[in-house]
Amino acid sequence: MSQMIEVKVPDIGDYADVPVIDVCVKAGDVVKLDDALVTLESDKATMDVPSSAAGVVKEVRVKLGDKISEGAVVVVIEAAGESAVAAPAAAPAATAVAPTPAAALHPPRRRQPLPRAARASRSPCPISVTTAMCR
């Protein structure tokens, strides 16, 4: 049994007629709980409207440039009963992969020693102050 869920703009403070600057989903997309559906921009902040359920987007009721307020319906999602809403919360724990430390992704580079000739001719300062002043 599937259930249709209307995702509405949550409390966005004292703002009315906030423009939609990005629509992140389209009809037929599969979304998870808390996925960004649309992005709104007020004069003070940019905010995403999150999905309140997991399921398939059946209808997008806003488009780029629309001005919407708190309580406006953004999308309609078809969720497969209570299990579809509860499953995304349980799934990450069951399929969670330990985060890979940044050091493992990008091992530190070992500095290669300079050839002996380059080390001998290398001075601590590339330009001599006295040379630059005399010219």
Image (cartoon, rainbow, N blue to C red):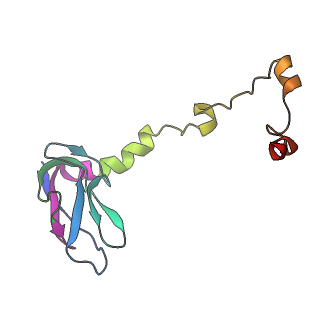
> Which of the pair 128/123 is nearer the observer?
128
At a point 22% along the width and 77% down the height, the residue shown is 16
Residue 64 pos. (x, y %): 17, 57
Q: Residue furthest front?
A: 135
Classify residue 92 as left or right of residue 112: left
Q: Is residue 74 above or below residue 29?
A: below
> Which of the pair 65/120 is nearer the observer?
120
> Which of the pair 52/125 is nearer the observer?
125
Residue 109 pos. (x, y %): 69, 29
* Quarter-of-image position of residue 102: top right
Q: Is residue 88 above or below residue 52?
A: above
* Quarter-of-image position of residue 61: bottom left
Q: Is residue 33 above or below residue 98?
A: below
Residue 135 pos. (x, y %): 80, 42
Q: Is residue 70 magenta?
A: yes
Q: How many numbered dots are placed on residues in this image?
A: 0
At a point 81% along the width and 18% down the height, the residue shown is 115
At a point 16% along the width and 47% down the height, the residue shown is 26
Q: Residue furthest bottom?
A: 14
The residue segment tinted magenta is 67-85
> Which of the pair 58/124 is nearer the observer?
124
At a point 36% along the width and 73% down the height, the residue shown is 44
Classify residue 14 as left or right of residue 27: right
Q: Is residue 128 magenta?
A: no
Residue 47 pos. (x, y %): 33, 63
